[in-house]
Image (tube, rainbow, N blue to C red):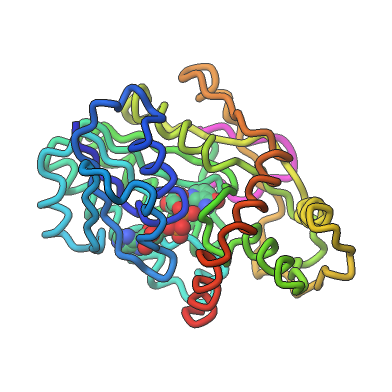
Amino acid sequence: MRILVTGGAGFIGSHYVRQLLGGAYPAFAEVAEVIVLDKLTYAGNEANLAPVAEDPRLKFVRGDICDRELVTGLLRGIDVVLHFAAETHVDRSINGSDAFVTTNVVGTNALLQAAAENGVGKFVHVSTDEVYGSIESGSWPEEHALEPNSPYSAAKAGSDMLARAYYRTHGLPVCITRCSNNYGPYQFPEKVLPLFITNLMDGKPVPLYGDGMNVRDWLHVDDHCRGIQLVAEAGLAGEIYNIGGGTELTNAELTERLLAEFGAGREMIEHVTDRKGHDRRYSVDHNKIVTQLGYEPAVDFTTGLRETVRWYRENRSWWEPLKERAAVAR
Ligand code: NAD
C-alpha cells in the first residue's frame, strides 16, 4: 500500500503521519510508502516529522499541490490520498484571500484531477465545520447547506464541492471529513490555543476577540486523526463525515481554563476588536461517524488541554522561531 499525504508537515497532517508510521493504525500496518507532499509555507515545518524522519517508508517532497505535473507524477500507483494541505488561518484570509483560493480550490482541483486519472483507490478530503456557516442552536448534520462566511471557509467549501463533483462525475472514491476546532501539540502558534499558551508562558496578555461569547467545539488532534483513519479504512465513497470533539466552550470559557492552568488572573486578558464576520457558533452533529464507523472521541478535554500546555512548556525551541516567522509572514 502506498499513501500520499498532502500538507503532512502541518499541524494535523504531521500528527497523522507520526501516528501512521508509529503503528497506531493497524489496518494500514502494511503500508510500504508514505509520501508527504508539502510546500512548506510559513505554516509548514519539516521538523514536525522529526520523530519519524528516519523511517525508510517516509518520503518527503517539497512541492505545491497546484503543480499539475508534479502531482500527476506523484499520484501514480498511489492507493490512498489524505488531503490536508490548505491555507488555514481565518484572519489571514480576511487580510488577503488569493492564496486561499489558489491552494484550497485550484490545488484541490489539481489533486482530484490527477487522482481520477491515476485511478486512486480512496481520496480523503479533510475539510472543516466552518463550511456550514454559523449556528445559534442545535448542530449541523452532513446534509446541511454550505453557508461559509469567511474567505477561508468559502475556499474550503469550494474544494468540498469539487471533491463531491469528482465523485459524481468521474466516480473518484472521495470521502469528505468536516471537523471542529483541533488542538494539541505542534499547532502553529498563530492559532488561538498555542497563541494564548505561549503568550502566557512569556507573561504577555492574551488577545480575546469581541465579547468572548463565540462558541467552538474542541477536538483533540489525536481523535481527529483517528476519525480520518476510520474514514480512510471504511468510509463509503461519496459520503461526508462530520468529526466533533464534544466539548463546546465560549472563547471566554476557554481563556478562563487556560488562565487557571497558569495560575494567572483576568488582568492577563486584553479585549480586542472582534474579527470581521466572526462566526458566533460552530457545532457539528457527528452521529453518523459514531454509528457507521465506530468513532468516539477519546481524549478528555481537561486532560488534553493540560498535556498540550505541558508540551508547549517543554518545546519552546519548537515554537519560539515559528512565532517570529508568523509575525514576519503577517
Ligand atoms: P496547517 O496550516 O498547520 O498546515 C497546512 C499545511 O499545508 C502546511 O504544512 C503547509 O505548508 C501546507 N501547504 C499549504 N499550502 C500548500 C500547497 N499549495 N501545496 C502543498 N502544501 C501546502 O493546517 P492544519 O491545522 O494542519 O489543517 C490541516 C487541514 O485540516 C486543512 O485542510 C484545514 O482546512 C483542516 N482543518 C483544520 C482545523 C484546525 O482546527 N486546525 C479544523 C478544521 C479543518
- Residue 248 higher or lower than 269, as above or below: above
Q: Residue at x 50, y 18 (%)?
A: 294
In percent of width and height, residue 209 lies at 74, 67
Locate residue 269: give its quadrant: bottom right
Residue bounds of the magenta highlight: 132-142
Q: Residue at x 11, y 59 (%)?
A: 69
In percent of width and height, residue 50 lies at 37, 54
Q: Quadrant of ligand 1?
A: bottom left
**Visible in this render: residue 122?**
yes
Locate residue 262: give its quadrant: bottom right
Q: Residue at x 26, y 44 (%)?
A: 55
**Helix, strand or loop: magenta stretch:** loop
- Residue 249 higher or lower than 245, as above or below: below
In percent of width and height, residue 193 lies at 65, 57
User: Along the horizontal axis of the image, is 7 left or right of 151?
Assistant: left
Q: Residue at x 64, y 65 (%)?
A: 195
Depth order, front residue of 118/308: 308
User: Along the horizontal axis of the image, is 109 left or right of 249?
Assistant: left
- Residue 219 higher or lower than 258, as above or below: above
